[in-house]
Image (cartoon, helix red, strand yellow):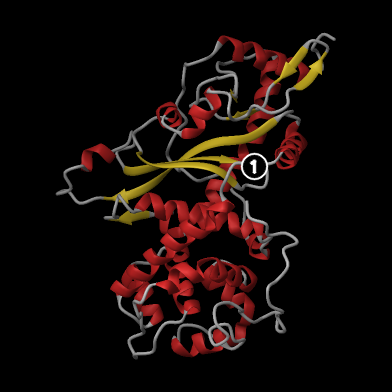
Amino acid sequence: MGPIRGRKKKRKIDNENGVVCGSLEEGSVDWWDQFCKQITGSVSPSKGVDEFELIFKVSRKTFNYICSVVSEPMMAKTTNFAFLNGKSMSLNDQVALALRRLSSGDSLIGVANFFGTNHSTVSQVTWRFVEAIEERGLHHLQWPSTEAEITQIKSKFENIRGLPNCCGVIDTTHIMMLLSASDRTVDVWLDRKDNHSMILQVIVDPEMRFHDIVTGYPGKMDDLSVLQKSCFFDLSEKGERLNGNKLKLTEGTEIREYIVGDSGFPLLPWLITPYQGQELPEIKTEFNKRHFATRLVAQRALARLKDVWRMIHGVLWRPDKNRLPRVILACCILHNIVIDMEDGVLDELTLTPQHDSGYQTEVCDMADNKASVSRDKLALYLSGRLPV
């Protein structure tokens, strides 16, 4: 995560409604008014901040920060992008265009018409932005690096439904694609629902921030297969992750750091899944309820990701499958930036756990014996029945 909260501003902002980034010309307080004039008829500048947030899905404060992050790599190249009237695009214009493309879900032509440019410019500017946010914004998406960070995460998870020493929630979703019948790899991407899709696996903290993602694999792969191909799996199996302080439950009983996931994932010493089966004993039923309530954090995070960055929400028309993983990563970084900036736009969003409509959770039968014992002890502890 980036050092956002409490971060000193490099330049005083005299008008809180102004966008300050890039050069003085680009960052002048009237950029928004000039932008509105550029796309006359599409936006009413009189609506101010609300209209800005509606169009770009971020506040002006966050827009300003994003501009500062991508400024150097985006402006380093000499390509001169322009509107159809010949006016050159400033940094603000380019960031605005890219955010609109990623957040609206509109086609290249739709975004081009909105901005008064051509679709090839929309494509090039968006890709340049994706490269820049990946290059300079990746510090917003990383595993906690300090004990204080991970301690805070564990405390907040325990406050949800009592799960102690929990460090994250893992979940997956499908990014839908409409592929050409002439695509020689078309069958590779056909998933169990007969859709062409790419999988996204995430590990989320209590504030719905992504701390680890894996994407690029065909949607037909199950959760176990994707997990096993991840660096997170290798690091956890080697004891290089989730290897912090163990929590003493009772005398002689400890619980290590772990993440939680649904029944599509394997039960491992560092990955706790729910009990399977019908008519479970009361202790196991109660554990599953707590487990499910905790997992909702990841479901809501993925739903918000797709709802805000709608380019990956619907069905992508013949996407470049080599570039798509980096577009997904850029959307995940932007998702985290909005959280790190404590953006008020989030307050207006409805939280829903629906992110993968039509896909039922598969069941993974892989279970580690030691993990089963640890889960039983955890269930007993949460029920208050663990022997002292």
Q: Is residue 91 above or below residue 198?
A: below
Is residue 68 or residue 82 the one in the foreground? 68
Quarter of the figure with residue 63: bottom right
The location of residue 211, given as percent across then percent down, is: 58, 43
Which residue is located at x 34 percent, y 55 percent?
316
Left or right: 104 with respect to 193? Answer: right
| Location of residue 119 with respect to 372 vertically, above or below | below
Provide the secondary structure element on which disc 1 rests: loop
Q: Position of residue 329 (x, y in %)?
A: 46, 51
Q: Residue at x 48, y 56 (%)?
A: 331
What is the quadrant of residue 368 in the picture?
top right
The amino acid type, in three-letter code, at marker 1 is Pro
Q: In the rendered view of the protein, which quadrant contains the C terminus? A: top right
Q: Residue at x 76, y 13 (%)?
A: 253
Q: Is residue 170 left or right of residue 312?
A: right
Q: How many numbered discs?
A: 1
The residue carrying pointer 1 sits among few (fewer than 14), some (14 to 19) or many (20 or more) residues within 10 Å by Cα, namely some
Residue 97 visible in the current orientation = no
Q: Is residue 205 left or right of residue 223?
A: right
Residue 216: x %, y % from top left: 37, 43
Residue tagged by mark 1?
Answer: 144
